[in-house]
Amino acid sequence: MNQNINEFTYCTYIIQQENTKKAQSISQGVLYIVATPIGNLNDISLRALEILNNADIIACEDTRHSQHILQWLKKNKKIVSYYKFNEKKRLPMLLHSLKEGKSIALISDAGTPGLSDPGELLIQQAISEGIPVDIIPGPCAIIAALVLSGFKITPFMFGGYLPSKAKERNIHLSRFKQFPGTIVFFETPHRIKKCLIAIENVYNNIPVCIARELTKLNQEIIRGTAATILNNIENKTMKGEITILIDNSSIDKNNMHDSTSQLQIADIQAEFNKLISQGLSKQEALKLLSEITGESKKNLYARIFIKKD
């Protein structure tokens, strides 16, 4: 990642000049959720640098990954790791520090902590125990990708990371099928092709956008259908952070099933058969249809399997 060090140093200089006057203004015993750049280091905000410089503890998803930010901060900073597999273990220590009056700045590898990154558990527990929580907003891959996609921005829905297993991936995608807007997911480079195949199977011929390496030198925006994008990247090695967007805004609202009384047996049967063809068992397909339609599995079973005279 090539960064403009001079500009970053200038920003740090400004913060250091203000530290003496502002150090006392930062509340103690506060959990600060600090957004960091998703790619370009120059996107870090002056306020983020201020909070990071004055916090008693910085909790990082990956201390090695965060070195490009941490190297510009004061050296007497307590840095602790806080990631997916140790967040429950770290929780008591962080909460104890907050109750002692120490301020904690939580950062993830990129973007805003809590959005498919560690942080949600700590935030919820702090709130439940009456500990002040504040947000230092900044770059967000979800919003950046939405704007660049050209799709309808409102309404939109964020579905997090897609499951790694094919069956669970299809189930997860199917849960959003009736949403009349843009659907946003995160995906890893080594699973992107399998993901596009799943999107094509579940949504058929629908506009899709891939936003890769946002704000970085190799930023790439690919638009098309899942099938055309898959064809374009067939012989290409995908790298970096990937955001996937599905434009489901053109769904026929007249055919949306707000209640199962509107569903025709043929519609249910067709959807059920499609889920079965994707590898789901009868029980799994019935359960997913029940989640989507709001109707009980018993009633759905009767509509599909019990013939009426």
Image (spheres, rainbow, N blue to C red):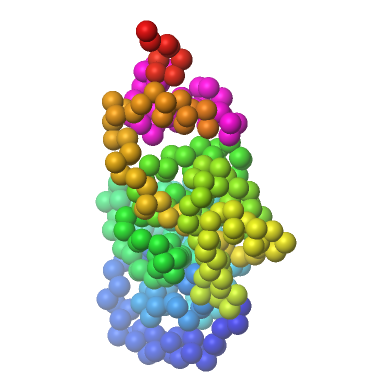
Give the residue furthest to the front.
Answer: 309
Question: Residue 296, can we see it?
Answer: yes
Query: How many marks do you count on the picture?
Result: 0
**Location of residue 281 (image quadrant):** top right
Residue for point 56% across, 83% down = 3
* Residue 118 x %, y %: 48, 54
Residue 131 x %, y %? 30, 55
Quarter of the image that includes the C terminus: top left
Q: Quadrant of the N terminus?
A: bottom right
Q: Is residue 242 above or below residue 180?
A: below
Give the x, y percent position of residue 173. 49, 43
Q: Residue at x 46, y 25 (%)?
A: 269
* Figure check: 284 above or below 201: above
Q: Is residue 55 visible?
A: no
Tell me which segment is drawn in magenta: 275-301
Is 244 colored magenta in this rendering? no
Looking at the magenta stretch, what is its main secondary structure?
helix
**For this view, does 65 lie left or right of residue 90?**
right
Q: Looking at the image, which residue sits at the far top? A: 309
Check the image and report above or below for 279 versus 94: above
Please tell me whether residue 294 belongs to the stretch shown in magenta: yes
Name the residue: 51% across, 37% down: 171
Q: Residue furthest right?
A: 235
Q: Nearer the viewer, residue 232 or 99?
A: 232
Q: Which residue shows up at 51% across the image and 75% down it?
A: 215
Query: What x and y, as percent, mark residue 170?
Result: 54, 39
